[in-house]
Amino acid sequence: MSQILRADLPRTEKGNDPNDNRGDPAYLNSIEFERLPVTPPPKASLVITDDELQRAELTPKCIVEGHLYADVAERVAPGGTGKTTLTLWESVHIVLGLPLYGRPVASSGWVLIVTAEDRRERLVARLGKIMDGMDIAPGQRQKVQQGLLIWDVTGQPVKLVQESDGNLVLTTLADDIIEMYRDDPPVFVEIDPLVSFGASEQRVNDNEQALVLAARRIVNGLDCCVRYTHHTGKQNAREKTADQYSGRGGSALPDGCRMVGVLQTWSPNDSGGLRPPSDLSSTPDTQVIVYTRAKLSYAPSNLPRIWIKRDGYRFEWFAEQQISDSDAKTERVERLLAFLADELAKQRYHTKTSLRTAISKLGMTQVQINEAVDQALAGGDLRDMPLPKDRRQGGRKTYLMPNDIGSQQSNECERVDQSGETE
């Protein structure tokens, strides 16, 4: 007869306890789990009926066609871009039912802005300047004053999410907003800025997912659009990225939102390759903002950028000009040649491989850069030239040089003979 002996084993190098009995069925059955307030519904209640199938819509209630819908949204921008002032200008259009960015307002109504960063007095003053710039009628001004409502919570501990016993939990704020405005709901709620209403950026994605959940509660309770104003990360701000993951923090927020917009300022000196529409003229005092709708689940993909020109508190918008594939390729070649010429003037020599580090500056993907280089070489607009001897490293002996540059550096490089020695 055999006897089974049990001995306590030491912890492993990873700190795991081999004596842990959590895999024992008897132990698992003895655990008392916290009962949630929501239980799985009966199977019969989940059956899709003919009536439900007929009434089902592919999109939620539209606020602004091709722009805002009754769902969770996020708008990202660096500090100082003017995102809050732009929100006020947009909200005037929603309240009055005026077309916004050339798109019809499908559901006009009142707007709630919850601000934890700018005092109500400052926003009201900006709103007055915006209405002056729009030159709207006295009756319309009165409608805006009654329909664009600002709740100032600056300096107050108002949170949608808080930490409790090591867990992130929703506060009652989302439900309180629903209860307060249920009988006369807004069509649009702006929460500005996101960072003021969360619990902790140390648990980034947990915090963001909780904020998405809070916004969804408001959306479900009021059938409105809830949008968070959010800041970009430092590196994204420097590189002026415009994809849906440009915001500071993790990926849970943009993944959970159905609309993600990105604002970046633009100047003629930017090296990103973007060119404003031909009818947009600017001065040194003019601010130009590029609005990219990086994600919009209820509209076609690859929506054109919106260019916004701001003079004081007056705003004008311009749609990005759509060009053919062949014209786009030509434009990318021109952008590449201009970039290489500028880099050579700074004594920076590029190869096809090194251009990978310039993706954000060129505003092109790696595939587009490779295509532009190949097209420029085939067309004679670009040449492989021998590197100056003191610039050679490893197997790198040539660089890309545009034919039409006239800098002193390029002229010197043209005097390099085939052996690589300077004449």
Image (cartoon, rainbow, N blue to C red):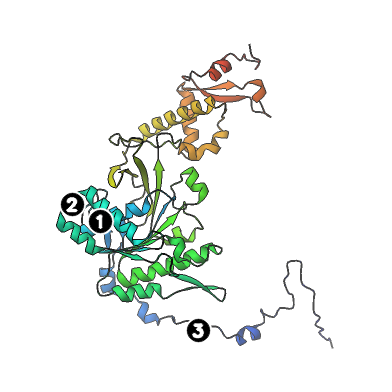
Disc 1 packing (10 Å; few <14; some 14–19; many ≥20): many
Please state which amino acid type lies under the numbered disc 1: Val
Nearest the viewer among 3 and 186 is 186
Q: Relative to 333, is 310 on the left or the right? A: left
Tally the numbered discs: 3
Q: Are marks 2 and 3 in contact (CB under 8 Å)?
A: no
Question: Disc 3 on helix, strand or loop?
Answer: loop
Q: Which residue is mark 2?
A: 136
Q: Relative to 215, is 51 on the left or the right? A: left
Q: Can residue 66 be seen in this snapshot? A: no
Q: Earlier in the sequence, mark 1 or mark 2?
A: 1
Q: Earlier in the sequence, mark 2 or mark 3?
A: 3
**Residue 237 screen position, x and y as percent:** 48, 47
Residue under the image location 49 percent in, 58 percent down: 251
Disc 1 from disc 2: Cα separation? 10 Å
Disc 3 from disc 1: Cα separation? 46 Å
Q: Which residue is mark 1?
A: 92
Residue under the image location 48 percent in, 61 percent down: 252
Say which mark, if any, is on residue 35. 3
**Residue 245 screen position, x and y as percent:** 47, 53
- Comparing marks 3 and 1, which lies closer to the viewer? 1
